[in-house]
Amino acid sequence: MNTQHKLAKSALLFFVTVCFSCFGLNNADSAASKTGIENPFKIENSVYEKLLKASVMSYGNNCRLKYFLNKLRNGEDVYIACLGGSVTEGAGPANYKDGYAYKFCDSLKKRFGANPPAKDGANIHFVNAGLSGTPSPLGLVRYEQDVVKALGHKPDLLIVEFAVNDGGEYYGTGAFEQILRGALQADKDTAVIALYSAAQYRNAQASMHVVSEYYNVPEISIQNAFNARNNLFSAKQFYTDVVHPTKEGHAFASDCIMSFLIETESRAEDKCCDVPEKYLKSPSFSGFKQILHDDENVKIDVGSFKYSDSQTQSTKHSSKGNFPNNWYHLPSSKTEPFIMKINCKNLLFVYKENAKWNDVPFGSAEVYVDGKKVAVFNEAAANGWNNSKIALIIDEETAGLHEVKVVPQKNKAFTIVALGYSK
């Protein structure tokens, strides 16, 4: 090869490298450092970019998201929360911090963290409010404590992920709607993204899409992107089981979110729209709140439920129980009922399935509403792992005064993990 040809080849190689670098797509290392896109499966970058775009279900109204991105660009403080189940928590990889939520936060810091005065992303405040095995009704119960209180601020960006935990039941869809609506109404600048994870079983994204579309919320579907992969990577490369992603699968989910934000940056800003005046489904969860021990709308006689259970479900990033405001009946206590008088139109009841490694003998409890037995909840599940279970035990169109009584089984422990209501 003569010198002229060598120079021409070098010039072409330099041009191609620069072009790819402009988009942060020349290789995984460069992409990660400049855009936060990792390309964990090492797919041809142009093909990978198309695959990421397949995850976009809707750009929604981008007004709030644009405001969030402007704050990032200017180095202002931003508050981010990811609310969801075990996928959000980081289940799958050996290290939970390889989960998509953490990877996404790291990617934001890489892309925006050097902007003054936000050196090294110190302006990005993040809380992971993922909790294994929980559907959106439990997310609704936890929202104020695990998102707003944990952040110490209303979120600038809230990512909601419950598609693989919700079964499409009425109160699941209603709770999902209230999470979106409540966050949008609480602060006019809060941006919300509905994230639909992938699973090899059912996925509730179809029913959730109807709600998200009604509120003009951006939607990202990891399920759709996975289905569009055309054998570019295998299910075994993506999943550790039937739902929890591998380290690479989580990085792929993070890339889908980052690609979405990069594309949103380049799009024209939409005119801001108001939150719809009416609910899509039902306003039954309007004004929902978790019952804490100082709620003036609730009168409680704890009976023998006067202790606190330290062994409630905990997140991977904390060794403490996630529900410190619980009511615990010891097996050695007298069987005195928990009696609550409350003015409400609905009531969500959270209990747990005791971990099989816990040698405390747990049992069942009978639950009565206005003198009528409505449920019997058993906490002595054979495969329990302190996982939370939730049930709607009051569901009325209008608020009224109700009496709720919980009667524990003799010589067995029982924990009322949490309660939440609307009035």
Image (cartoon, grey):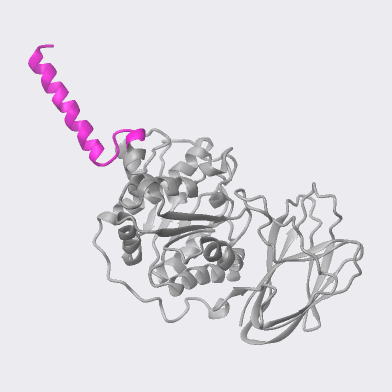
Magenta span includes 3: yes
The residue at 10%/17% (across/down) is 5
Foreground pick, 271 / 329: 329
Q: Residue furthest top?
A: 1
Q: Position of residue 145 (x, y in %)?
A: 59, 65
Q: Is residue 44 visible?
A: no
Q: Look at the image and tell me in which quarter the C terminus lies.
A: bottom right
At which x and y percent is residue 286?
54, 78
Quadrant occupied by the N terminus: top left
Exactly how many numbered labels are in the figure? 0
Residue 214 at what x, y percent from top left?
A: 41, 71
Can residue 150 be seen at all in this image of the molecule?
yes
Residue visible at 55% across and 47% down in the picture: 90
Q: Quadrant of residue 59?
A: bottom left
Most common secondary structure along the magenta stretch: helix
- Residue at 15 percent across and 22 percent down: it is 9
Is 39 above or below relative to 293?
A: above
- Residue in the image at 67% along x and 76% along y: 347
Give the answer, above or below, for where 279 lies relative to 156: below
Indicate whether residue 99 is drawn in magenta: no
Task: Name which quarter of the figure residue 408 lies in.
Answer: bottom right
Magenta-highlighted residues: 1-30
* Residue 72 vertical placement versus 293 (above, below): above
